[in-house]
Image (cartoon, rainbow, N blue to C red):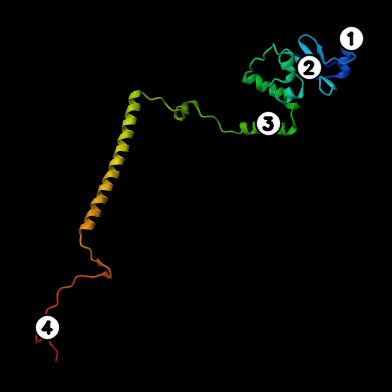
Amino acid sequence: MVERISIVEPVTQSVQGVTALLESLGRAVEPLPDVVDLGTAKLVLSGKKDCYYTVTEKGKCSCPSATYRPGSTCKHIRKHFAENKRRGQTMAETLAEHDRNLHKMPKSYQRMVAASREAAECEEEPIPVEQRYKAVCKPISEEERAAKIAAAKEKIEASKQQARDLKERQRIAREEAESEPSLITRGGFRPSMPEEEPLGDFDRVS
C-alpha cells in the first residue's frame, strides 16, 4: 500500500506499495522502473532497490541524505528537479524544518539539542532597554575625534621628552664621574693622609 505522498513532507515508499500503484495506473511493473513520474513528485528507486524515495518539486526528498541534513540539496533533487532552484530559507523556516525532522535524528543528537535549549533558557535576563546605551559605543563628532587624537599625540611626545631628559641626565652623571680623581688604586682604596712632621727632642723616648 502506497503511503500518503506529500510534496511538503515526502515519505519513502516500499517497493510493494509502488508496484501496486503502477498496477492501478496500468503501467508496466517488470522490470521495476528507476523513476515513477507523478508530476509534482517523482518516486526514485534506491541504490539497493529496496525502496523508493519521494522527490518533490518543492525541493524535498525522503532519502537519508536530505533527511539527516535539513536544508541540503541531495543528488535526487539535483537530478530530477534541477530546473526548480530551491529558494533560500528564512531562519524561522529552517528552525521549523529542523524541529519537524528532529525525531528522525540519532538519540545522541536529540539529547544534545535538548541540553542546549535548557542551557539557553537558564541564561541571565537581557540588558534592560534603559541601560543598553551604556553597552553600546556612541558615535563621536569629528571635533571630538580630533581632540582625542591631539591629546594622545601630546602624551606620546611628553613620554619621549621624559626619555630624552633621563638620557641626558645619565650622560652628565657619567661625565662628572669620569672627571673626578678616583681614590681606587690597583691594590684597593688608598686614603690620603696628612704628612708626618719630624719628632722633636721632647717627643723622643730614650
Q: In which quarter of the image is residue 23?
A: top right
Callout 1 secondary element: helix
| Sequence order check, earlier mark of 4 and 2 | 2
Q: In this view, does 159 lie to the left or right of 126?
A: left
For label 3, count other residues whose C-alpha is less than 10 Å away and answer few (under 14), some (14-19) or many (20+).
Answer: few
3D distance between C-alphas at marks 2 and 3: 28 Å
Please name the residue shown 73% across and 34% down the image: 108
Residue 53 x/y as whole percent: 79, 19
Q: Residue furthest toward the front?
A: 186
- Pointers 2 and 3 in contact (C-beta within 8 Å): no
Q: Which mark is residue 199?
A: 4
Which of the 4 image quarters holds residue 195? bottom left
Above/below status of 202 relative to 186: below
- Mark 4 surroundings within 10 Å by alpha-carbon count, few (fewer than 14), some (14 through 19), many (20 or more): few
**Amino acid type of disc 3?**
Val
Compare marks 4 and 1 and give the one earlier in the sequence.
Answer: 1
Q: Tell me the element at label 4.
A: loop
Residue 9 placement (x, y as % from top left)? 75, 17
Asked if residue 1 can be seen in this view, the reply is no
* Mark toward the viewer: 4 or 2: 4
Whether residues under marks 4 and 1 lie with C-beta atoms below 8 angstroms apart, the answer is: no
Residue denoted by label 2: 54
Q: Which of marks 4 and 3 is in front?
A: 4
Q: Which of marks 2 and 3 is in front?
A: 2
**What is the C-alpha distance between the residues marked 4 and 2?**
133 Å
Residue 186 placed where, x, y %? 27, 68
Q: Mark 3 points at which residue?
A: 113
Amino acid on which disc 1 is placed: Ser
Residue beneath disc 1: 24
Residues at marks 4 and 1, CA–CA distance in whole angstroms: 151 Å
Amino acid type at mark 4: Leu
SS for dot 2: strand
